[in-house]
Amino acid sequence: MKTGLVVSAHPGDFVWRAGGAIALHVKKGYRVKIVCLAFGERGESQFAWKQPGMTLDKVKAGRKDEAERAAAALGAEIEFFDAGDYPLRLTDAHMERLIDIYRETNPSFVLTHSLEDPYNVDHPAATAYAQEARIVAQAMGHKPQAEYSYNAPPVFLFEPHQPEMCNFKPQVILNIDEVWDIKRKTFEILAAQKHLWAYYERVALQRGMQGGRNSGQGHDLWRGLSAAVPDGLGGTGMKTVVVRNIKRTDADLVKRLGALGTATVHEAYGRFGLMKPYLRPVWTGGEAAGTAVTVLAHPGDNWMIHVAVEQCKPGDILVVGCSADNTDGMFGDLLATSLMARGVTGLVIDAGARDAKSLREMGFPVWSKAISAKGTVKATLGAVNVPVVCAGINVMPGDAVVADDDGVVVVRRRDAADVVAKGEKRHADEEGKRKQLAAGVLGLDMYNMREPLAKAGLVYIDEPEED
């Protein structure tokens, strides 16, 4: 039987943020175990503390009862650590038990909190504990006499209460329509947090409508659960696959897009397809254009990049998306050497790279989120040549990718010919404008700006006004 593991700081967290995913996977035949690190007795029980004669023990007993009933309603097992909240601090014994749970359950996926939460320090603490236990559990020297079967699972980060304040970017939305009634009923079990019932109804509807629009299946009843990981690793249905044969954008069109540069291509594409500006070239002056071979990797794990090299052909550009935020140096000069041997034009990675000096000397262009000497492991399967999200842009295998000092832009294969035509026309127009500007013509006059500026209220004066 496949299993899933949820590491939750407090009882409400696994209901509000993961209840739909839990119920959905239970319905699909998964065994799901919840590890609840604390009862939320101090900071997550506002209504309970308003009752007369309330004590810490009474609050903890009430929250434990709520959590047990909620887990049962979702069809999951639950284990409590009673580590205390506000702040959450695990002891060595707690960590040992969490590592044992990873080995005992050998989960297909893990659900836990966002990496950041300025309003609740317990949440990123729970994530750190979950990640640490995941890593230690695969160390053969930890309890070397123990018998177990364990592969480090992908980790999914569920949506925080205020995602925009937590640098959280959802990359998958699960359709939880078929289990929505189950999730909604668990809300009513959490009487200590009644003030959140309506809020999380709205979150589900909002994400559901967003997911429906993105999938072409949207309607008002489509509820959603969002997570900061690409859809389907382990527990959500997407296989860990390598797709060998993909349709690539015509090579001549890619070459012409590359000659235009990212700024012109972005404008010609209706200002679409530009990756977020935190992606920067490891060395300045590099340019690349190619067809995307996509990689879905996991934080601090470059196993699938090695797998992807074999699938690359001359003229390709490797595009690596990561299942969670990461800045480790997942790519360096050895992998670059391998890619160059296969005629790959460059790399775009939503994580870190290293060996910057060597990459510059080799002339292999890389665009990354960070430069970091921190090394990586090879432990968790991902996928090659599947749709990935990289720096905020959905990239399909075979899409055209153009990268230079101005950034990285992606053009859908079906749109490439149209963008080339518009981009080359724009480039020709700009050449004429460039000659006028070089001759001394002002942009104010060339673009006929004076009249609209006057209408907008701009006034010229000859001398500064006296105080």
Image (cartoon, rainbow, N blue to C red):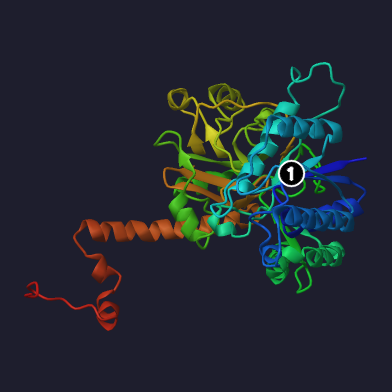
Give the amino acid type for the residue marked by disc 1 in the picture. Asp
Please tell me which residue lies in front, 44 or 4. Answer: 44
Q: Position of residue 120 (x, y in %)?
A: 59, 52
x then y, percent, for residue 161: 63, 59
In the image, residue 104 above or below residue 125: above
Element type where label 1 sits in the image: loop
Q: Is residue 320 left or right of residue 233?
A: left
25 lies left or right of 424: right
| Residue count near mark 1 (Cα–Cα under 10 Å), binned few <14, some 14–19, many ≥20 | some
- Which quadrant would residue 290 be assigned to in this image? top right
- Looking at the figure, which quarter contains the N terminus? top right
Residue closest to the far front: 53
Q: Is residue 250 visible?
A: no
Instruction: Give the left or right position of residue 383, taking residue 268 as reference.
Output: right
**Quarter of the image holding residue 417?**
bottom right
Q: Is residue 251 visible?
A: yes
Which of 15 and 212 lies nearest the eye of the viewer?
A: 15
Pinpoint residue 6: horizontal percent, then vertical percent: 77, 46
Q: Residue furthest bottom?
A: 455
Residue at point 53%, 23% (across, down)? 333
Q: In which quadrant will I find the C terminus? A: bottom left
| Number of marks | 1
Please report the residue visible at 86 percent of the width from the left and 51 percent of the height from the top: 25
Query: Measured from the top left, where is residue 272 in percent x and y?
Result: 54, 59
Q: Nearer the viewer, residue 239 or 406?
A: 239
Q: Label 1, on which residue?
A: 82
